[in-house]
Amino acid sequence: MATTALALADILDARRRMEGVATLDTPLVPSPFLSEVAGRDVFLKLEIAQATGAFKLRGAANAVALLPPETEGVTCCSTGNHGRGVAYAAAKRGLRAVICMSTLVPKAKVEGIRALGAEVCIAGKSQDEAQAESERLVREEGLTEIAPFDALPVIAGQGTIGLELMEQRPDLETVLIPLSGGGLAGGVAFALKRIKPSIRVIGITMDRGAAMHAALQAGRPAEVTEVESLADSLGGGIGVDNRYSFSLCRDCLDDVVLVTEEEIYRAMQAHYYEDRIVCEGASAVGAAALMAGKLGVVKGPLATIITGRNVDMAVYTDIVNGRDVQLGDYLLKGAAYVA
Ligand SMILES: *Cc1c(COP(=O)(O)O)cnc(C)c1O
């Protein structure tokens, strides 16, 4: 493994630091259904047990805890799970948090962030304009920006999931990790490989607009066109000047596997009907790869991370009821669930 700026000690420190903000030792539960599918013991790491409904609270909690006492406040422009994590972690520390969003963000998301104690700043008609506003708050109001994945405190925070997996099931041989910007996969895979070099760690993402996959193929950060996906938490680029998450994913992931929208749809149904778990499309990509037989012969025991539960409930009920879902100009044909 190439040397990186990250050390296992940073992840151990992160765990201590995030206590009382993020939930530690989230459950690792068996999935009899997926075990049957894989012919191996399959476990689900339930990050849906975080107060904000997603693992991103870990990285946000560590990053906020590391800020010096004179910090004025924090900002970011995530409309999703990172924004929720930053809002919650800042409120716990009594810090001001300003989450910047474009006018296109649905009201429910705006209300969700406000309910976690943050100020919402609506600026511009695109994510880029919201990002520019967040940067202005850094320059003019002295706020500190918390990056969603390409920052060492955030990566170390996400990496604590790797420590827990190794304590909960030291016999794990394969771990599946939903992959977007690579803060989660980079941190968790780094921790796993440091503790157990023989473990196989596979990043899983959607087959349309997967920036980290494109970058790993190209050997450097690459631009992709973003499209709507059931795995909406896996969208977005990795940044052309990516500093940490790209090289960590390149060095620590054994493979990256892509799944289709149809496969994600069926996996969300399976988590619901078989595991009785409500989760986002981004969380179902591991099950999708297993169910589609895309991992070939896997070594077990195996774990997949159920990263979040902040799903649009209207779309979600359409999926569990087998109805069609319109994703931008792509019509995803529905089908009732059959085991
Ligand atoms: C952010 C997110 C991911 C991916 O994490 P990265 O660090 O960006 O790779 C996966 N699942 C959910 C629910 C997320 O919010």
Image (cartoon, rainbow, N blue to C red):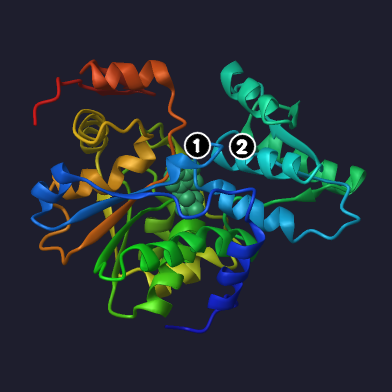
Judging depth in this view, the residue of 290 and 128 nearest the camera is 290
**Residue 3 appears anywhere in the view:** yes
Identified by mark 2, the residue type is Arg
Q: Is residue 116 above or below residue 44?
A: above
What type is the residue that disc 1 sits on?
Gly
Res 125 → quadrant = top right
Q: Position of residue 87 (x, y in %)?
A: 69, 38
Is residue 223 in view?
Answer: no
Residue shown at 39% from the left, 24% from the top? 328
Label 2 CB less than 8 angstroms from ligand 1: no
Please determine whether, in this image, residue 309 is positioned above or below residue 115: below
Q: Which residue is mark 2?
A: 84
Q: Quadrant of the N terminus?
A: bottom left
Image depth: mark 1 or mark 2 in front:
1
Identify which residue is drawn at 87% across, 53% down: 71
Mark 1 is surrounded, within 10 Å at the Cα level, by few (under 14), some (14 to 19) or many (20 or more) other residues, namely many
Q: x, y percentage for residue 300?
A: 17, 64
Of the numbered discs in the image, which one, if any, rests on residue 53? 1
- Residue found at x 39% / y 67%: 167
Dividing the image into 4 quarters, which one contains the C terminus?
Answer: top left
Label 1 – label 2 distance at C-alpha: 9 Å
Circle on res. 62 = none
